[in-house]
Amino acid sequence: MALYRDEGVVLRTHKLGEADRIVVLFTRGRGKVRAVAKGVRRTRSKFGSRLEPGSIVGLQLYEGRNLDIVTQAERVETLDALRTDLDRYGRSAVLLEIIDNATEDGESNPAVYKLLTGALRELDRAGNPLVVPTFVARFLVLEGVQPLVDACVRCGATTDLVAIQIHEGGVLCRSCPSGEPISEPARLALQLVFDGRVRHVLDSTTGDVARELETLAAKLVEQHTERRLRASAVLYEQLDEGVGSLDR
Ligand SMILES: [Zn+2]
């Protein structure tokens, strides 16, 4: 078995047997990794408390056939506010769930890793509700599905843009409605994020627009994940057919 080191964010954990835990991590070098942490549910475990969802940890692991085995874990930094503040905790859970749902095991993506750790730090520091929507917008860019937000994707109209739909590729005008409703201030905020002015949006967007963007972010992720799942379902069908044709 090969030993390796990596840094990762704990996405979730679940119990395994009496004393062990399965830990799902998003690592910098190997993308999503599932590993067993042995004995961590015993009170005297050396690293049990470090492997909580949202923790950023330095790890040493043994490569296993199905699951890797955690042999060392040390906290890279303590993001204490994420654990003690309920709003920040809830928002960090949304980030972790997005990465868990929208990535496949072993798909390395250091840019997504950097985005995730940056968003967790920003949440820990300021608990800003805009962290989730700006994270989602930049995640979609990294996934290659940045929506166009300055003109209707069906007819090219640049005014009266009232909805957004990831499958369609962006915003739609009142004559071509589809997808989720979007207000003009929310659309402009998204445009600023895509133009690289994330800090400006984080610092200046408040109230109803912030709330709208948070709700909208969840819908956009849903649209993207559905699309991704459908794409992989089609791929599996093709693979099945491929295997079938070998039998004939
Ligand atoms: Zn249109």
Image (spheres, rainbow, N blue to C red):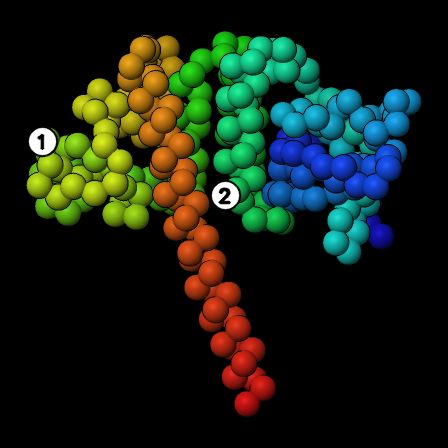
Residue 37 in the image: x percent, y percent? 81, 37
- Residue located 91% across and 22% down the image: 44
Between the residue at mark 2 and the residue at mark 1, the CA separation in whole angstroms equals 32 Å
In the displayed structure, 172 sits above or below 212; it is below
The residue identified by callout 2 is 102
- Residue located 77% across and 46% down the image: 68
Which residue type carries mark 1?
A: Thr
Q: In the visual, does 219 lie left or right of 180? A: right
Residue 126 in the image: x percent, y percent? 50, 9
Is residue 149 in view from this perspective?
Answer: no
In the displayed structure, 240 sits above or below 225; it is below
Q: Residues within 10 Å of mark 1 (few under 14, many from 20)?
A: few
Q: In the visual, does 149 lie left or right of 34? A: left
Is residue 14 in view from this perspective?
Answer: yes
Q: Closer to the camera, 187 or 178?
A: 178
Residue 235 in the image: x percent, y percent? 47, 64
**Label 1: which secondary element:** loop
- Residue located 63% across and 15% down the image: 83
Q: Closer to the camera, 211 or 146?
A: 211
Q: Specify the label residue 159 is tagged with.
A: 1
Q: Closer to the camera, 214 or 189?
A: 214
Q: In the visual, does 230 lie left or right of 28? A: left
Which residue type carries mark 2?
A: Ala
Q: Specify the label residue 76 is tagged with.
A: none
Residue 78 in the image: x percent, y percent? 68, 15
